[in-house]
Amino acid sequence: MLRQRLIRFLKENKGEYISGQKLSEQLNVSRTAIWKHINELKNEGYQIKSHHKLGYKLVSEPDLLIYEEVSPYLTTNFIGKNYIHKLTIDSTNNFAKEIASKVPDGTVIIAEEQSAGRGRLGRSWLSQKGCGIWMSVILKPNIQPQEAINLTQVAAISVVKAIEELSHVENKIKWPNDIIVNNKKVCGILTEMSSEIDKINYVVIGIGVNVNCYNFPEELKGKATSLNLETNSKVDRKKLTASILNNLEFYYNTYLQKGFEYIRPICIAKSITIGREIKVIYNEGEMEGKAVTIDSNGSLIVETKEGKRLSIMSGDVSVRGLLDY
Ligand code: BTX
């Protein structure tokens, strides 16, 4: 694609003028086409200086999670090869579900802002403009529908690893779908699925990360935080997005090839839930106990006060001493 090649070329020569003539020769298009694309890029937030004799000079790129900005850091084979970016959207998970049956495995939908970001159980997810990563990944695994629950864990360890890589801050998983830094929520994962009795049509993994957000409303201040707030430094959203996707592809492939057992030790090591008193609210009711481990199916094993061991596949888990419980 011309646009992508032009951006790559400008980036390779960032800070230096390249003549319109040279660009048109290198990219094999007319100078008018180059001029038109340069104007489009300027409108999107690329700072490009134009000089009638010297040509064009890229000064800075916009802080947008568009493909051209994220792909230089992507090392995946299939996740993110089809990449859809929106400035604003209601919910990337909603959009992903609308298009899932028509797009390839590994399609990524990412937005700068969500007007109706969703959490689990009808809750909402605050997704302010340009400060976080609000994305959904469409996967079409050949596994049983009841195993899809493991994909939330696969996504969670991928986010943990990516945050460690780029932010160097300790972060842990509140089973099954939250990432916690310094006792507050920095990321939430919402996994949704369309399936038949024994076949998955698609799974949508929605990942919301508060990266450089700092304006949380009063009701979230006690429980939500961002990487920027916790580390006092701005985190590169482009690199973090790519790292999450790179890790996701790696752990997803590992899970598919070797099974949950293989990633289970990481889930346990990175869990903030295990060893703590918890309350679980699930369809049939509510129970309290101590989280003991995660078993080979990915279920949380809870020991009640009476010494009974229960296996929880899904549910709303509160950890004592964490997030208002
Ligand atoms: P959850 O149900 O575990 O968490 C939702 C709860 O978290 C809310 O009720 C609120 O208390 C709190 N919360 C809301 N917004 C934030 C925030 N930005 N940071 C920290 N805490 C918050 C978690 O659900 C799953 C969230 C998935 C979000 C992604 S974003 C991309 C994709 N699209 C979409 O609509 N949802 C997913």
Image (cartoon, helix red, strand yellow):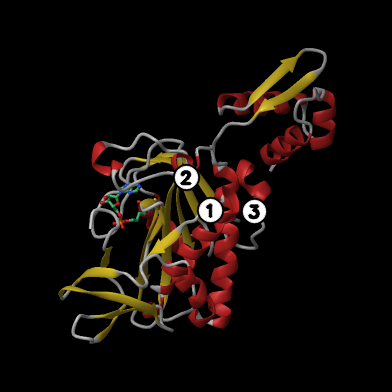
Above or below: residue 216 compared with residue 15: below
The amino acid at mark 2 is Leu
Amino acid type shown at disc 1: Ile
**Vertical comparison of 142 with 98: above or below:** below
Residues packed near mark 2 inside 10 Å, few (<14), some (14 to 19) or many (20 plus): many
Q: Are marks 1 and 2 in contact (CB under 8 Å)?
A: yes
Q: Residue furthest bottom?
A: 308
Instruction: Report x, y in % for residue 235.
Output: 55, 41
Q: Residue at x 58, y 62 (%)?
A: 247
Task: Kindly report the distance in space between the C-alpha atoms of the residues bearing marks 1 and 3.
Answer: 15 Å
Distance from the alpha carbon under mark 1 to that under mark 2: 8 Å
Q: Residue 163 has which mark?
A: 1
Q: Which residue is mark 2?
A: 227
- The residue beneath circle 3 is 74
Amino acid bearing label 3: Leu
Judge by depth and name the residue closer to the eye, 64 or 90: 64
Residue 25 in picture, x, y percent from top left: 85, 32
Residue 140 appears in the rendering:
no
Circle 1: element type: helix
State the residue in front, 234 or 32: 234
Residue 60 appears at what percent x and percent y?
A: 65, 28
Viewer-nearest of discs 1 and 3: 1
Residue 289 pos. (x, y %): 23, 75
